[in-house]
Amino acid sequence: MRLVTAILRPHAVDDVRAALEPLGVHGMTVSDVHGYGRQGGHTEVYRGAEYRVDLVPKIRVEVLVDDDEADAVVRAVVETARTGRIGDGKVWVQTVDEVVRVRTGEVGAAAI
Amino acid sequence: MHALLHALASSPASSPHVDAGDTAWVLTCTALVLLMTPGLAFFYAGMVRSKHVLAMIMQSFACIAIVSVTWVLVGYSLAFDKDAGAGLIGGLHLVGLAHAADGVPGTPLSIPPLVFVLFQLLFAVLTAALLTGATADRVRFESFVVLVAVWSVLVYAPVAHWAFSPDGWLHRLGLLDFAGGTVVETCSGASALALVLVLGPRRGWPREMMAPHNLPLTLLGAGLLWVGWIGFNAGSALSAGSLAASAALATHLSGVGGMIGWLALEKKLTGKATTLGAASGAVAGLVAITPAAGYLQPLPALLLGVVAGAVCLFAIRLKFRFRYDDSLDVVAVHYVGGVVGTLCVGLFAAAAVNPAVTHQGLFLGGGLEQLGKQLVGVAATSVFAFAATYVLARVLHATMGLRVTADDEHAGLDTSQHAETAYELTTTSTIGRSHG
């Protein structure tokens, strides 16, 4: 099993969810995060004083998938979220040792 | 019939003469002035970080409680009793409001004196609350309570006597201060400067960005202040007639001018017109018109607002230049705005607006005489308020300690001073167990 984690532009999350449904992905975890990479921050102005804000708001999407689904999921996320401009984000994949569904006690691929 | 009704209405039910219309208007204005302090609380609360927001509001609410008591006990007497010497301070005949219902010494009124007592009480409350822009994010609550209690008696009451009491030396000199450009704005601004110098900067200032956490609150507060300010200035006519009308109009126009002046300059300097700029500019215009409302014609009032909005925006740069953390810009908005407005009376005061104007402003052909008197008023108020507040703050700092510990400041005043959190917006923030 794999954990696919994507850091994306906030407005991309709806499209990503729609793109993953046909692939059989029926669940994800989404969180608000802040960070910076190659994309700089932005400038804010309060009472004439300008401030450089370094951390940019992003969305973190986490999806658990079976081993053979990981590549398709990653490809779908990347293609959906890409605008071509700096700040589109990153996607990475980790191996997961065990998954348990709390309600039923199912383990492994059945719990995904 | 109409004349008969009028005669009946104005026949003295009790002596001295009380006019029902005047009384109703000033009572209404009294409520409007009370609204300004919670308005100020929200204006300021939106500008601090989310961990200090309750403490910010609490400081204003505490002023309502503290100053109401000190005013009734002794402040009112020191401000408005017959002079106790040299026009510097009132006597003690009205302590505890004894004899207060009998009249305001030297001030002929067409309203019950107790209305005047409450109206002026709420001025004292608001002026103390203005100081909280300087104590933001770092003052110990216990020390703040003592500071405000003593300040309202030793700093505010004397300055109110100087300018508002007919026995006061500035009033006798001929200073024209309609609703408190010296007493409220200059006094609170100079005192705020003294407080920030004693308190020192917020930890991390100016290196860290300390952006406002909730500007809608600030705009709500500015709106409430604007409404209340009509009562503050037009109520200072102490009657419901043409003087109140021109004061109300001048007040509104200056607020408008302030917003325009601030935003125009801000747009030119930074490329954006901000909502905080709109709120700040309106308040700067309202501050500036406070001493001038009952003396200026409409267009000079609008012009004063524009000038005040622009000048106050520039004045904010002073704190970065001279490195004092005037956290919410009490000096830049209230001191600078108050001084601009008070001096402006010397330029534009018109006898046509108010017969109390004996020397018209410079631009109305009256020469420099009135401007000189305004300058004396500003200088005297500045020096006294700054020096007295500085000494008071030093004494409190050395005895009680004015500032919270570093840990308490990092944690935020909401939890460290009041054991509360303003916003429980996430599920995890409410996980815990009761020890009730």
Image: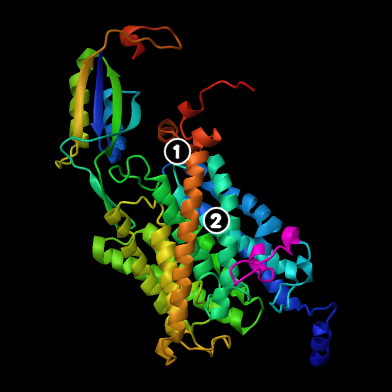
- Residue B283: x and y, percent? 45, 64
Cα–Cα gap, marks 1 and 2: 23 Å
Does the residue at mark 1 contact the one at mark 2 (Cβ under 8 Å)?
Answer: no
Which of the pair B86/B59 is nearer the observer? B86
Which of the pair B42/B11 is nearer the observer? B11
Q: Which residue is mark 1?
A: B51
- Let me know if residue B355 is in the magenta part: no
From the viewer's perspective, tell me whether residue B114 is left or right of residue B347.
Answer: right
Q: Which residues are magenta?
A: B78-97
* Number of the front mark, 1 or 2: 2
Q: Are marks 1 and 2 on the same chain?
A: yes
From the viewer's perspective, tell me whether residue B257 is left or right of residue B81.
Answer: left
Q: Amino acid at mark 1?
A: Lys
Callout 2: chain: B
Q: Earlier in the sequence, mark 1 or mark 2?
A: 1
Q: Residues within 10 Å of mark 1 (few under 14, many from 20)?
A: many
The label shown at residue B186 is none
Residue B198 versus residue A28 in the image, above or below: below
- Residue B190: x and y, percent? 44, 60
Q: Which residue is mark 2?
A: B128
The image quarter containing residue B171 is bottom right
From the viewer's perspective, tell me whether residue A28 is left or right of residue B271.
Answer: right
Work out whether residue B217 can be spotted. Answer: no
